[in-house]
Amino acid sequence: MMRGPGRAGRAGLVVIWSAIVMTMNACGGDERYRAASETTGGDPARGKLAIERYGCGGCHNIPGIATARSHVGPPLTAMAARMYVAGEITNTPANMESWILHPRAIEPHTAMPDTGVTDIDARDITAYLYTLR
Amino acid sequence: MSHTLQSALDPAGRQASLIYHLWLTMFWVTAAVFIVVAAAIAVAVIIGRRGRHDASQHPSEFTLSTAVVAAVAATVGILFVLLAVSVRTQNAITSFGQASAISISITGHQWWWEVEYEDAQASQRVTTANEIHIPIARPVVFKVSSHDVIHSFWVPNLHGKRDLVPGITTAIWLQADRPGTYRGQCAEFCGRQHAHMGFEVVAESQAEFDRWLDGQRQTAAQPQNDQERRGETVFVTGRCSMCHKVRGTEAYGTVGPDLTHIASRRTLAAGSIPNARGHLAGWIVDPQSVKPGNVMPRSPLPPDDLQALVAYLEILR
């Protein structure tokens, strides 16, 4: 006679499922996106697409962006926790936006080009970078 | 301009359409065969289980032989029909109108595509890379060969595959009937960056195509300000010109793609990354992190030179 998964089996499945759900909450994707969005006024999900489009990954290693694995510039890991941007200005959303828009206005000798980012895209990119803790 | 999903099941031209219909025929015939075979197995299992202990229910040797012979005959018949349909499709594709075709030669490199529009007048020839423009509703012949290893030219929405073999030039004809941008890729494993050896075929109206071809025939745009002039100097006197050509300057390298109109292309590094300034700058400095193993070396340019070089490349429309 066929038997379905026993009580122990079912309990096991529940434990595994809860573990998966708890791990996902611990990673806190949604929560981090919400917080970053509140801090910066931008949309992190759109920012992620903008990062791919403008080619930030050409130079930076950016967590969560599959194609951003370069070592030309500094890695942007834990960007939300950094104290300074470019070693020049404090890491606030407004400063981050101005850096992304016109890096040479802040650091005249930087190799980072003005990538033609629009104001809205700069805000969204900042929002995404603020999800990186 | 519509961007179509790369798929042989969404034909946008004459040849691809013929291949698609051949595929459909084969799919439905073999699907029917599969269903008949699965049903026969099911029947055999059921009858077999029912008559397991009763020898009188076993079919006679003659019945079994007849069934096997009939099945073999049907298989051979179906295969011959499919063979005939394949040959007919093949003939239809190859006998396709070859008059007044545009002739484009394609040379495969590890890992990019050299594209040359042929013309009786040498000055009218156009060399570009990784982006092929063709007019719609007009036959185009691609003469394909390879510089190094065997590659394969494949634009699924327009035609089947054609191998690029070093030392041998073969021709493949195609015609796009629907305007659009169709992605193609190398379909023969050719080394470490085989997966990053893509290209695009832009099928457009004859007028748009003529305008594009005319633009590509021009020599490179002249720098207009100090930044761009500095960029040109970096390009021509630096290492870029060892491998790349920009027509109208002293840069005559032939190892890598012709960059005379680099800014007019939609992608960089053979379809690997969009042609945006961030990608371009990163690619110039460290192409090895984008396409590890490709022949372009890292170039740690001074920041001011890099900025100027990027500004210069962006005017090469």
Image (tube, grey):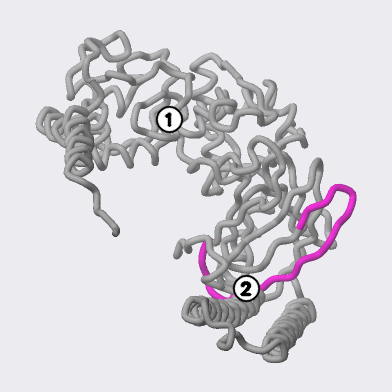
Residue at mark 1: A68
Q: Is residue B158 above or below residue B83?
A: above
Which quadrant is home to the N terminus of chain B?
bottom left
Q: Residue at x 24, y 53 (%)?
A: A4
Range drawn in magenta: B163-181
Q: Residue at x 47, y 80 (%)?
A: B50
Identify the subunit bearing mark 2. Answer: B
Element at badge 1? loop
Q: Residue at x 69, y 38 (%)?
A: B246
Residue B68 x/y as whole percent: 70, 84
Question: Which mark identifies residue B309?
Answer: none
- Going by the image, does B4 lie left or right of B72? left
Would you identify the image quadrant in which residue A101 lies?
Answer: top left
- Going by the image, does B116 lie left or right of A94? right
What type is the residue that disc 2 sits on?
Answer: Ala
The alpha-carbon separation of the residues under discs 1 and 2 comes to 36 Å
Element at badge 2? helix
Most distant residue in the left direction: A38
Residue at mark 2: B16
Q: Which one is in front, B210 or B284?
A: B284
Residue B203 x/y as whole percent: 57, 66
The magenta stretch spans residue B155: no
Identify the subunit bearing mark 1. Answer: A
Residue A116 x/y as whole percent: 37, 36
Q: Residue at x 17, y 44 (%)?
A: A7
Residue A66 x/y as whole percent: 41, 35
Q: Which one is in front, A43 or B22?
A: B22
The answer to whether marks 1 and 2 sit on the same chain is: no
